Image (spheres, coloured by chain):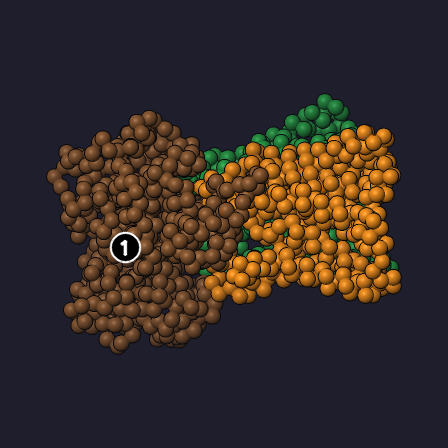
Amino acid sequence: MSVQTSMQAVLKSVDKPVAIAFVFILVMLLAGSLYSSSFLSANYLLQQLQVAAFLGIIASGVMLVILLGHIDLSIPWLVTVGGMMSTAAAGWWGPEWAIPFGVFCGLVFGLINGLGVAILRVPSMIFTLGINAVAQGVMVLHTGGFAPQDHATKLMHWLAVDRSLLGIPNAVFIWAIIGIAVVVLLKRTPLGRYIYAIGNQEAATFLSGVNTKAVLIACFAISGMCSAMAGVLLAGYSNKGYQAMGDPYLLPAIAAVVLGGTHILGGRGSYLGTVAGVILISLLQSILSVMQMPEAGRQIIYGCVIIAMLLVYGRGQKVQS
Amino acid sequence: MKDLKLRLGQSQGVLLAILVFVLMFTLYIANHPAGLTVPVATTAANKAVLLALVAMAQTLPVLTGGLDLSVGMIFIMTNCVASSLVSGDPWQVAVGIVIVLLTGALAGFVNGAIVVYGRLQPIITTLATGAVYYGIALLLRPVPGGEVDEDLADIMTYTVFEVVPTSLVLLLAVVVIIWLPFRNSVIGRGCYAVGSAEGAAYMSGVSIDRSKLAAYTLSGLLAGVAGLMLTFITFSGEASAPIGGTYTLNSIAAVVIGGTSLYGGTGGAIGSIFGAFILRTIDDLLFVFDLPPLWQPLFQGVVLLVAVSLGAARVFRIRNRLELFK
Amino acid sequence: MTDPQASSRNAVHPGSAFWRMQGIGKRYGGVVALEDVDFACAPGAIHAILGENGAGKSTLIKIAAGVVQPSAGKLVLDGAEVTFATPQAANSQGTVCIFQELSLMPDLSVADNICMAEPPCRWGLIDHREQRRRAEALLSRVGCEDVHPLELVKNLPLSRRQMVEIAKALGRNPRMLILDEATSALTAADVEKVYEILRDLRRQGMAILYISHRMHEIEELADTCSVFRNGRHIETFAKGARSDNEIVQLMIGREYTQIYPAKPVRETRPVPELEVSKLSWSNRLSEISLSVGKGEIVGLGGLDGQGQRELLLALFGVLRGVSGEVKIDGNKVRLSSPRFAKSDEIGVALIPEDRKSEGLLLPMSVRDNISMASIGRFTRGIFIDRQRQNAEIDEMARRLSIKVGDIDDPVATLSGGNQQKVVIAKWLMTDARIVLLNDPTRGIDVGTKQEIYQLLRDLADAGTAILLYTTDYDELIGCCDRVSIMYDGRIVRELTGDAINEENIVASALNLTLDGQAETAKPAGEPL
């Protein structure tokens, strides 16, 4: 298999995943509308977007890490840290501290992730797993030891639940702001260029005189902040922060990024694809629940759909020589 | 002499894991109010063997340079299958056990087939199939329950000749009957070759597809053995996502602590067994040292983090920074 | 060389050839790697294949070894047509290849590696004792009794690995053995040993295809030589039928003196830009002293793997724990990282050894690759000023005449020569004052090579200091104002002026004393 021919194949398929993902979304909406006409109503769609926003914010950070060729398995408990620390901060110092402190805690854990991966060069899979366990430990200690306040502040609730401008949910605005920031970061800044470069060939990037360590640390820190921010909103949504609130988000976040065409080994992918992946996953979950599919069937269909979609376009090259 | 030195040098990781385990276990027994009695050892062994089996299952894909994020879910799924089938008259029990093991192997085979023929990345493949296996487990056991042949369960969870915990005998049997022959077979060595350098393995005539398929299938089988054992211990089946997740994550940690490289090619299941024992003994130590229960999860997390960071010593010895990227 | 086509295509007696290629062609996408090749091998003979990089040699042996399939033509073995779908298929028919990129698995033991394909088995399991015995026998056959069969391959030095590779190939009992640059990593003693083995195998009737860039090796070993150029089989002749000069002309297809730009004549030595004294690192570099003047091209020579690569990496801030002193433009500096080395106050650039893994980001666009080292210069606030950047990139691409359909195409779609130009362009964008090059013309067509030589000379004329490591003696002779030869981590000789010739380079590379050349070839380290 020559590099040239394989590259041409890659070239042609660059935007294929994104296109396929959007086609899937349309097909799902149409199929859903056959089942119930409310599927195409603006209200239903906005509701879907609102639910998708939480996943979208997490996926934004995860995408940066995956673009580097790494992975962040500390999402579940960093989401929880965001949710629980923001509510706790509101209790300790007042409601205005809630969101900044929640996100700050995510940043701290994200930085440690980055340091472990960039400086100690522990494989990200295992290091972020360790951080996940540590974050869990801290949260257990926190709830048990100090009987903290776990109620979301009014602002958190407003951000997560209410709709303001044009009836669009506030959470969607937050996702949009984060999304635009990520797009600008990836397309317009040196950091974005370096992220793709490291995902393609870290040694070559280092030899181009790029501070690769700083790039790695920055991305893990952003991922930690995104997870925590999603946790803050989730706490606002359900009005409190609680343990294991982030558990259901690991697989969907990674799946959304990968279904959106980002290569799991890094270096390739667009944010538009991630948006498509996030909407796709949220819609799939929603349709399965509207159909009153039991949890078991949902999980099975969910897994099969991910595999099937990846088989359609995500296949790697056969190894030779 | 040179032989011995080389062999020792090449099994440093395993030896270190064994040493750490022996030290920790001695510390545990020394501080245990009852000392080393058969019941204490049996309880410790039953818990440890579960993780050891799952860690062995994780080792095989890791050796080929892959990963299996679905081992915990296969473990849960086979537990649920066993809670439905392994009961009744001896024939039914026997057939049930065979079906449980085949279920595990089939699940592993599916993972392998998707990775090999579908050419998808193992991480994302097994993340997705894990959801499927969990779904199947839920389908079988929407609520915890079921039953298992009690006589057999008693035999498996107590002792042989009232001295040796049966679970340890089972583990030893798995090592002798499954792992060692595999390790010394052409296909088993193919797994190491593929994990070490896939391109070179191809050039050397190693059947890459067959090696990977075998690794994932055997991994599923071992997870099935663990699921069966879980059923004997709990007398029931439960489709619990947290348990599956925890076992998957701990199995990866056990593999790393046992000296197997996540990049593939080096290590082995023996190391992973002791890696699992170490993780379990940490829990036990926290218990005998009366660490407040609230501190335990944090302590476990920190120990895990430190353990996986120990490999970083290598990083600081590297003098050519390009080697960092290999 | 009036018309190569007219001379006999094949000097091997047709009756004795048991293995032949007929009309073999191979295309990669639109690129023709081999075209209409007829070629044959006889048992009991060493057949050398000569040709420049990109002449099609490596494709030829890949087809012979079953790694790639030809797009046209057929392979005939013992009179019957065969197809090799995999390397195993070729192996089972007695064709075994020793590749340049090692086919060893680093985490496995030497014995495991040697017996990887067909291990001795008992009851379905690998018989380790027998395997070890076999490995020991093969190792002693290649004179590597010092290698323990249980040692892991990754713990062996490169030269031992290469010998293990040879032992592994012999273990397959080949009828035809193909060696691709198999001696490039070996020490002189090992090379002798390999020659001995090869001659021995020839006596036993094995057919040996030998690919090497070293003319003297071919003179010493080969019975027959075949020259390839641009994917075509140009000529096959018996050893001694052609002079070296004729062979070189066959290889490059034109007069070879023309390809290098003229060197400037200097009365005095230029002001040093880079001065290195007593630089040592690990056990690979010891007490290296060297200087490169403004506008000067200094060559690094010697056998492969004598520390040249490490020296360049040290000067680019990649290595940790480097001792000694480095002065740039008279100022002492500590090169702590590539980021610092490329900064304005230092201004060092490195064109690395392996462009695919160290120089380029293959799936990314030509534009992104060219800008990778200099994005920092095109920022406004935190954003990239794309207009300014693109203007400069386009200008650079024009200046180096990089042939590319669209500058936003992935760099992987370019030919090797254009890829290397992209790497060079990337570093020219930083306006480096010192350019370090590690074998920049490897695997590049003659035309592009010539452009690169001209470019280097132009850069030097504009005042850049250039340190060029190359494995090609001709380049040292044709390009460099001075040449320092390295051996075992030291600079053993510095050649200037007319002393830069092949004999001196070869002799110095083997660390032999130069007879009758003492006046011009001064040992390095002495002040000139």
Which one of the lettered chains is coloured orange? Answer: B
Residue occupying image coordinates x 32% and y 71%: C290
Label 1: which secondary element = loop
**Left or right: B245, with C466 as reference point:** right
Q: Quadrant of the N terminus of chain B?
A: bottom right
User: What chain does mark 1 sit on?
Assistant: C
Q: Quadrant of residue A110?
A: bottom right
Horizontal arrangement in the rendering, residue A81 relative to residue B326 (left or right): right
Residue A185 percent coordinates (x, y): 56, 51
The vertical placement of C302 against A274, above or below, is: below
Specify the quadrant of the image occupied by residue C341. Answer: bottom left
Left or right: residue A30 versus residue C155 is: right
Question: The residue under label 1 is which amino acid type?
Answer: Asp
In the depicted view, which residue is nearer to us: B172 or C481? B172
The one of C244 and A60 positioned closer to us in this rendering:
C244
Q: Residue at x 63, y 62 (%)?
A: B310
Measuring from the top left, give residue C256's x and y in whole percent: 18, 50
Q: Residue at x 22, y 44 (%)?
A: C223
- The residue that disc 1 covers is C472
Q: Which chain is green?
A: A
Residue at 82% in and 52% down: B163
Hue used for the chain lettered C: brown
Which quarter of the picture shows residue A146?
A: bottom right
Q: Answer yes or no: is residue B86 visible.
A: yes
